[in-house]
Image: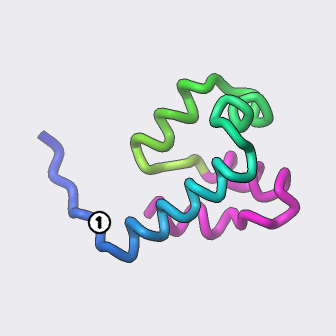
Amino acid sequence: MKNTIPDTPEKLEQRKHIHALIKKTFGKLSQLAKVLDVNKTTVLIWLNHKHIPQKRAEQISRITNGKIQASEIMLCDT
């Protein structure tokens, strides 16, 4: 079994905020998947593993014209 350090309450809140902002901006996860040209399952895996790849974080930032910063996405995933 993998040993992981539990997230702090601040980290959990930050992650929830970013993921909620992504959902609010794109509506459904399937819409985000369509825009990023990936499967919806891929997006679900990213969110379940609490990690969005840097390339995709930068792509989300470009698509939203900076409304969602790639650095914010990457910080909440570390």
Q: Judging from the image, what secondary structure is the residue with disc 1 in?
A: loop
Farthest bottom residue?
Answer: 10
**Front-lying residue, 16 or 41:** 16
Q: Is residue 60 left or right of residue 5?
A: right
Quarter of the picture holding the C terminus: bottom left
Q: Is residue 78 left or right of residue 72?
A: left
**Front-lying residue, 23 or 7:** 23
Q: Where's residue 34, x and y in %?
A: 76, 28
Q: Please tell me in which quadrant of the rendered image residue 6 appears.
A: bottom left
**68 falls in the magenta region:** yes
Q: Compared with residue 56, is residue 40 higher up or lower down, i.e. above or below?
A: above
The residue under label 1 is: 7
Q: Residue at x 64, y 48 (%)?
A: 23
Q: Is residue 32 left or right of residue 35?
A: left
**Count of numbered marks:** 1
Q: Residue at x 41, y 40 (%)?
A: 48
Q: Please tell me in which quadrant of the rendered image residue 32 appears.
A: top right
Q: Residue at x 75, y 35 (%)?
A: 36
Q: Residue at x 64, y 69 (%)?
A: 71
Quarter of the picture holding the N terminus: top left
Display coloring = rainbow
Q: Compared with residue 35, is residue 21 higher up or lower down, i.e. above or below?
A: below
Dominant secondary structure (helix, strand or loop) of the stretch shown in magenta: helix
Q: Where's residue 41, x and y in %?
A: 54, 24
Farthest right residue?
Answer: 65
Amino acid type at image mark 1: Asp
Farthest left residue?
Answer: 1
Q: Please tell me in which quadrant of the rendered image residue 39 appears.
A: top right
**39 falls in the magenta region:** no
Label 1 Cα crowd, 10 Å radius (few <14 / some 14-19 / many 20+): few
Q: What residue span does the magenta drawing correspond to?
A: 54-78
